[in-house]
Image (cartoon, rainbow, N blue to C red):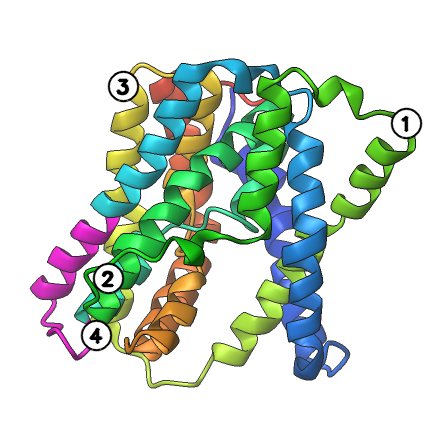
Amino acid sequence: MITPTTILLSVLPVYLLIIGGAFLRRIGILKQKYDAKIMQIIFWVMTPCFILDRMLGAVILRDYSTLVTGIGLGFFLIIVGIAIGYLVGKAIGLEPGHGRRTFALASGCQNYGYTAVPVVQILWGTSAVAVLFVHNIGVEIAIWSFGVMLLSGESKLNLRRMINGPIIAVVVGLSLVLLHLDDKITGPPRQLIYIVGIGAFPIALVMTGASMLDLVGTEKPSWKIIFGSILVRMFLAPIVFILCAKFIPMSAELKQVLLVQAAMPAAMVPILLAKIYGGRPAVAVQVIIATTIVSIFSLPYIITYGMRFLDLTPIKP
């Protein structure tokens, strides 16, 4: 029988890479001045190659119901998460203009990239990872439309914000699969895509750890923000995700994706959005650090009992 300890041991390398990144920053090997260039290479070169490598040959992507449901749920669940975050922010006394909207966005947006992808890969393999990338289209649309409008007060949608390396790679990969052209990419080009992409997420996790260390101590902790974010991200949002996976008809791969998303800590992108669009970055920082630390302990239980509830089994014990 799968236990929380089994799940923890399976995904522990993900957290060890994050801790390793923080350690490398602390001892001065990974210097902050190199961060921007490293992340540009990860974001625009390595991650797109990784996405293509996982999407090419993924037959599940030819299931149109999975595509529509995946994108739709990616969008819908972010909106629901932000709404829950807004209500909890109001309940704990945060006011608009003093962190409530930033809290709503930060606590309502789960990590859907550099932490989620390795966990999905470890537990369920390539097909589920391919579905995760499709699901992430809906997540990106929700964050860069509704999320930006929430923080900035804008009423117009700017589609150019959603054009980035990973989204382009998903669109290209999905097009090749749907047109049955993915099997034409073979030999050295296919091997090159694999080699370039394979290091994307380990390096990104190391950079995540380094960045999180930079954020520690930048703002005096607020216990109501810390406990409020844990309530949203580690309890209320997982219930919604898992119930959707249980009662909405969908493929097994999409159920696997939603279960991992239910267990994820907060995403880091709200920090950037808060800086750009007049939010409170310090609030987002506290949410991210608190939920990431707690997720080490909560993730094994959410996934273990979620698997039993949804009748899922990982590819290996």
The part of the chain drawn in magenta is 81-99
Q: Earlier in the sequence, mark 4 or mark 2?
A: 4
Task: Assess disc 4: are there few (<14), some (14-19) or many (≥20) residues with their C-alpha within 10 Å of its C-alpha.
Answer: many
Q: Earlier in the sequence, mark 3 or mark 2?
A: 2
Name the residue nearer the viewer: 208 or 64: 64
Name the residue nearer the viewer: 74 or 265: 74
- Residue occupying the point 33% across, 21% down: 309
Amino acid found under the numbered disc labelled 4: Gly
- Gap between marks 2 and 1, in whole Å? 45 Å
- Residue 91 is covered by the magenta coloring: yes
- Residue 211 is covered by the magenta coloring: no
Judge depth for marks 4 and 2 and give the one in front: 2
Q: Are marks 2 and 1 in contact (CB under 8 Å)?
A: no
Up-down relation of residue 92 to residue 7 (above or below): below
- Residue occupying the point 85% across, 40% down: 192
Q: Earlier in the sequence, mark 2 or mark 1?
A: 2
Name the residue nearer the viewer: 143 or 294: 143
Look at mark 1 in the image and give the residue it sits on: 187
Amino acid found under the numbered disc labelled 2: Met
Look at mark 3 in the image and give the residue it sits on: 248
Judge depth for marks 1 and 4 and give the one in front: 1
* SS class, disc 2: helix
Look at mark 2 in the image and give the residue it sits on: 149
Q: Does the rendering let one see residue 229?
A: no
Name the image quarter holding residue 176.
top right
Look at mark 4 in the image and give the residue it sits on: 99
Amino acid found under the numbered disc labelled 1: Gly
Up-down relation of residue 303 to residue 265 (above or below): above
Judge depth for marks 3 and 2 and give the one in front: 2
Task: Assess disc 1: are there few (<14), some (14-19) or many (≥20) residues with their C-alpha within 10 Å of its C-alpha.
Answer: few
* SS class, disc 3: loop
